[in-house]
Image (tube, rainbow, N blue to C red):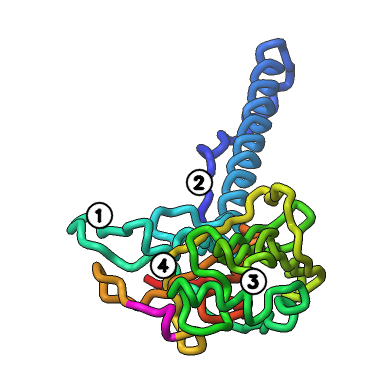
């Protein structure tokens, strides 16, 4: 970059044999002008140096791109997987699939834990008597019989109460809520508590999300019971009926859910679907 200099300095006047006041003032003006010119040049060079430094900044450490065209960061949200929310195209008004889906990543069989707290074959058969499930290995299918939430102790809780049929001795075991508690801080959920008698109101962890009896999109539902899978009428997309689903950490894509015709806790990851 070329720096434009100021006007050329006038030549040195011939030395006078006698230096009166006028010659002294001229010399002072000449020296003062030179100082001002030097200061101006230094300031210009400093400003140009700052601009060059900013233009040549390392992209890795430079300012973030805040332009409108930059792609927004993915924010996992369990609620963005629900067909029940009625997602529609803003321009056409036609139904569209939810913006996110769950990718199934693992499962944990809960049959042994459920039976250990009194939820045996007879109790599970109560749901079948009401035609809510096709097998005897199922959480109850009645609306709001199952609840999932993340407690303020950081544990994921699954609670349920099986069907109560009056004048049926088996139903005596269904008067109190069954519950399982999971430590979900690691890569896989771990059962840390199982009991029959959960009665206190949940203290839900702030920021955690959960949903009940929802139609949710799963990208790879082949391992889930076929009886819980269906097709969304509006979009033709595959859906899964979940009895309960939870996202313990709003900053994490990890989710957990249970479905009918199964005594299994499923794990998954939230991903973009469109």
Identified at 42% across, 63% down, the residue is: 82
Mark in the foreground, 1 or 4: 4
Whole-number angstrom distance, CA of label 2 to CA of label 4 = 71 Å
- Mark with earlier residue (3, 1): 1
> Residue 215 shows which numbered tag?
4
Residue 272 image-quadrant placement: bottom left
The mark that comes first in sequence, 2 or 4, is: 2
Is the residue marked by circle 2 packed among few (<14), some (14-19), or many (20+) residues within 10 Å? few
Q: What residue is shown with label 1?
A: 90
Category of crowding for the residue at label 1, using alpha-carbon neighbours closer than 10 angstroms: few (below 14), some (14–19), many (at least 20): few
**Count of picture labels:** 4
Q: Which residue lies furthest to the bottom in this view?
A: 222
- Kindly tell me whether residue 195 is visible in this rendering: yes
Q: Earlier in the sequence, mark 2 or mark 1?
A: 2
Secondary structure beneath dot 3 equals: helix
Q: Where is residue 60 in the image (x, y as percent from the top left)?
A: 62, 66
């Amino acid at each position: 970059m070329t720096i434009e200099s100021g006007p050329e300095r006038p030549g040195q006047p011939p030395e006078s044999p006698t230096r009166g006041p006028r010659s002294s003032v001229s010399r002072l003006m000449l020296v003062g002008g030179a100082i001002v010119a030097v200061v101006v040049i230094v300031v210009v060079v400093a400003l140009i140096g700052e601009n060059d430094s900013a233009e040549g900044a390392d992209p890795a450490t430079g300012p973030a791109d805040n332009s409108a065209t930059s792609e927004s960061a993915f924010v996992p949200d369990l609620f963005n997987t629900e067909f029940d929310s009625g997602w529609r195209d803003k321009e056409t008004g036609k139904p569209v699939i939810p913006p996110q889906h769950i990718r199934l990543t693992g499962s944990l069989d809960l049959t042994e834990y459920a039976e250990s707290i009194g939820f045996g074959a007879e109790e599970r058969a109560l749901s079948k008597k009401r035609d809510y499930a096709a097998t005897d290995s199922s959480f109850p299918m009645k609306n709001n019989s199952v609840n999932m939430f993340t407690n303020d102790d950081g544990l994921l809780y699954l609670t349920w109460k099986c069907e109560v049929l009056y004048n049926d001795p088996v139903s005596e075991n269904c008067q109190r809520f069954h519950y399982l508690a999971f430590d979900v801080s690691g890569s896989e959920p771990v059962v840390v508590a199982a009991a029959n008698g959960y009665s206190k109101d949940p203290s839900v962890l702030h920021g955690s999300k959960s949903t009940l009896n929802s139609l949710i999109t799963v990208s790879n539902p082949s391992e889930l019971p076929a009886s819980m899978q269906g097709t969304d009428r509006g979009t033709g997309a595959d859906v899964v009926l979940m009895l309960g689903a939870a996202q313990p950490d709003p900053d994490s894509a990890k989710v957990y859910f249970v479905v009918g015709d199964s005594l299994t806790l499923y794990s998954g990851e939230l991903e973009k679907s469109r």
